[in-house]
């Protein structure tokens, strides 16, 4: 009996803790002033597969040290909606540890992302960004007298983009990054002279775009639009 009572007590406490979070997620966008709303759009694809798109709306928002947004989740109501390239994102019920989100699955990476937010008054707000795919390619590692580099397949780095490369082998794991606009390769210093790149058992390469639109600061709250796109490839 004691074990059963303890079980129900723990369950009751968990439900009590979860309830405030769920109630907080029911902030309706029609009650949030436009200049306190942060619209966060995120898209990610791994290994040339499905693209997962998520839209999250915040109020009392801010950014952490990794430039990831946080705040009180907002739920769209009335005429409000969100779409990507004309396809509506679907509402997801808030969970115990997550707030209201809107999601969409695409079979391929669209490269051009046109997000259309319709506000509660029916006015449309359109935000557009583009980002190309990236791939390691068959001969991604180049070694010369001037140093070793990783060359990727795809366009050069553009404004707001970051390319990350991780090399893994049985005896080392190295990470490199570049934000240099126009770069088509990334230097990988620190390898021993004559190091055989074929010893690398895995390469992870990703292109990330972070873009803030209509950014403003008011009473330490961030609002406007923040878009993050991630295209990642893992080669073994």
Image (cartoon, rainbow, N blue to C red):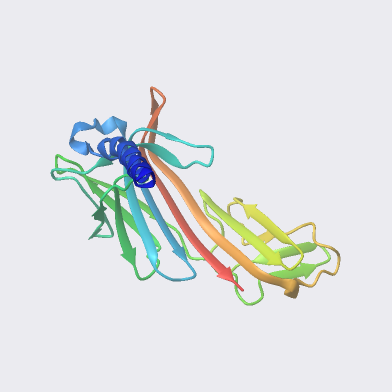
Counting labels gives: 0
Looking at the picture, how far across and down is residue 66, in whole percent? Answer: 53, 42
Q: Considering depth in this image, is 186 or 99 the residue closer to the camera?
A: 99
Q: What residue appears at the point 77 percent right and 57 percent down from the top-left corner?
A: 189
Furthest residue in direction right, as rendered: 193
Q: In this picture, is 3 found above or below 28?
A: below
* Residue 62 in view: yes
Looking at the picture, how far across and down is residue 195, in whole percent? Answer: 82, 69
Q: Considering depth in this image, is 182 or 129 the residue closer to the camera?
A: 129
Q: What residue appears at the point 39 percent right and 52 percent down from the top-left corner?
A: 42
Q: In this picture, is 68 found above or below 108?
A: above
Furthest residue in direction front, as rendered: 1
Q: In this picture, is 185 found above or below 128?
A: below
Furthest residue in direction bottom, as rendered: 138
Looking at the picture, how far across and down is residue 202, in whole percent? Answer: 65, 69
Quarter of the rendering containing residue 43: bottom left
| 205 horizontally vs 45: left or right | right
* Residue 153 in view: no
Looking at the picture, how far across and down is residue 126, in whole percent? Answer: 28, 48
| 235 horizontally vs 126: left or right | right
Position of the C terminus by quadrant:
bottom right
């Amino acid at each position: 009996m004691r074990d059963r009572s303890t079980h129900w007590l723990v369950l009751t406490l968990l439900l009590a803790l979860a309830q405030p979070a769920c109630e907080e997620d029911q902030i309706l966008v029609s009650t949030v002033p436009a200049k306190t709303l942060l619209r966060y759009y995120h898209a990610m694809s791994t290994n040339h597969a499905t693209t997962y798109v998520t839209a999250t709306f915040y109020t009392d928002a801010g950014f952490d040290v990794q430039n990831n947004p946080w705040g009180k989740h907002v739920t769209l109501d009335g005429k409000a909606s969100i779409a990507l390239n004309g396809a509506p994102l679907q509402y997801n019920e808030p969970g115990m540890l997550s707030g209201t989100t809107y999601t969409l699955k695409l079979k391929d990476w669209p490269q051009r992302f046109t997000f259309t937010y319709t506000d509660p008054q029916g006015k449309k707000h359109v935000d557009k960004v583009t980002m190309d795919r990236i791939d390691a390619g068959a001969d991604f590692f180049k070694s010369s007298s001037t140093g070793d580099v990783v060359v990727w397949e795809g366009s050069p780095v553009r404004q707001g983009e970051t390319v990350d490369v991780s090399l893994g082998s049985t005896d080392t794991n190295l990470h490199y990054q570049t934000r240099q606009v126009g770069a088509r390769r990334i230097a990988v210093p620190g390898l021993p002279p004559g190091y055989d790149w074929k010893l690398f058992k895995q390469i992870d390469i990703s292109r990330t775009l972070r873009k803030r639109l209509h950014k403003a600061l008011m009473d330490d709250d961030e609002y406007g639009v923040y878009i993050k796109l991630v295209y990642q490839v893992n080669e073994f």
